[in-house]
Amino acid sequence: MSPPPDTIDSDERTELDALRLENDTLRRHLGRLEDKVQRAEESANLQAYQVKQMAQQLHHGHSQETDVHEQQQQQRFAEGAAPLEVRHLHGILQWLHQAKADMVENDRSKVQLEGDVRLLYNLLEKAKRERKSHDGKVQRLEKSIATSNTRAVELDKELQLQRKSFTRVLKSDRDVYETRTEAAEANAERRGRELKRLMTWVEKAESKFAEALRKLSAQAEDLGAANLGDLEGFAKDMSEDVSKLRQGVADSMRSRSRSKSKGRSCGREEGTQEENDKGKAKEKTKKTKTRKTGSKGDGASVTDADDSKARSDGGERQDKGHVDDNSLERPMAKV
């Protein structure tokens, strides 16, 4: 864990103050040493001057009232003392020069140290700015992450609500479609039963028509060749009607096999097919009536009218599931 920035600044300032104080102390000490050297030089110069004066006096032979032996002792003392002082002063000068060189080197080191401290301080300030910038980025990212998390929670809640709503709608639609499917299946079964009854009626009608044709053929021999062509045409039309009716019933049965998969739409198609079959039968009856009217006159018109009535009665009875035998015998009785 790094110390606070304020603590670092105070430590650096304290260190710089200590270095400045030490520098001032060394400068004062150097000044005192220089003063001592100067005084020592002055004293040495004075002593040298005195020695020189004494030497000159001895050289010129100025005699004094003192004893010669005493003068020789003083001279030896002066000669022995002068080199000792000079050596002492020379040592002091060397020491002072060395101290001065050390002070200069120390000053250079301090200048370099101040430069290093200044560089480190600048690096520290740069690191502080970068850290501050990074702290700002981290705060922005944390805010963005918090916003994203909040948005994710809201979206999750919205998704849960939509899922529940969708499930509820699907369940209601499924119930509706199941009801419709059951109704369509019941309708298909009902129409299947009706088709079975209709098929039974067609088979009975076909047998009745065949019997009627046989009877008509037998009666045609008695009526003669004049009405034979009309009777054959009438029989042919009846056969065509029966064939078309059988085809319509077969188509209805095939439609019924597809009704279980199509549901209600299949029921509508079956009803439409039945209506088309009835419409075709009615149109065919009208054509037969028109042709009979043109060939046989009034008697044939009455016969065709009765035959059309019998067919329409039979068509109306298809949904009821039974056949009126008298409707098949009327045309034959008329003929």
Image (cartoon, rainbow, N blue to C red):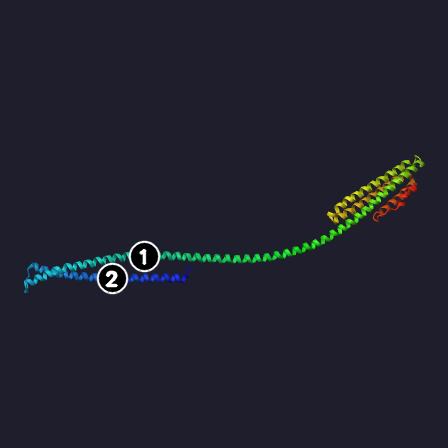
Residue that numbered label 2 is attached to: 31
Residue sticking out furthest to the bottom: 65
Local secondary structure at mark 2:
helix
Which three-letter amino acid code belongs to the residue tagged 2?
A: Gly
Q: Is residue 26 above or below residue 256?
A: below
Image quadrant occupied by the C terminus: top right
| Residue at x-position 53% and y-position 57% | 145
Dot 1: few (<14), some (14–19), or many (≥20) neighbours within 10 Å? few
Residue 34, quarter of the rendered image: bottom left
- The numbered mark, 2 or 1, whose residue comes first in the sequence reads 2
Quick check: can you spot residue 278? no
For the residues labelled 2 and 1, the Cα–Cα distance comes to 20 Å
Q: Position of residue 112 (x, y in %)?
A: 32, 56
Q: Position of residue 79 (x, y in %)?
A: 12, 59
Image quadrant occupied by the N terminus: bottom left
Residue 107, quarter of the rendered image: bottom left
Quick check: can you spot residue 84? yes
Residue 204, quarter of the rendered image: top right
Q: Position of residue 239 (x, y in %)?
A: 85, 39
Q: Position of residue 125 (x, y in %)?
A: 40, 58
Dot 2: few (<14), some (14–19), or many (≥20) neighbours within 10 Å? few
Residue sticking out furthest to the top: 225
Local secondary structure at mark 1:
helix
Question: Is 121 left, or right, of 57 in this rendering?
Answer: right
The total of numbered circles placed on residues is 2
| Residue at x-position 39% and y-position 62% | 7
Which three-letter amino acid code belongs to the residue tagged 1?
A: Val
Residue that numbered label 1 is attached to: 111
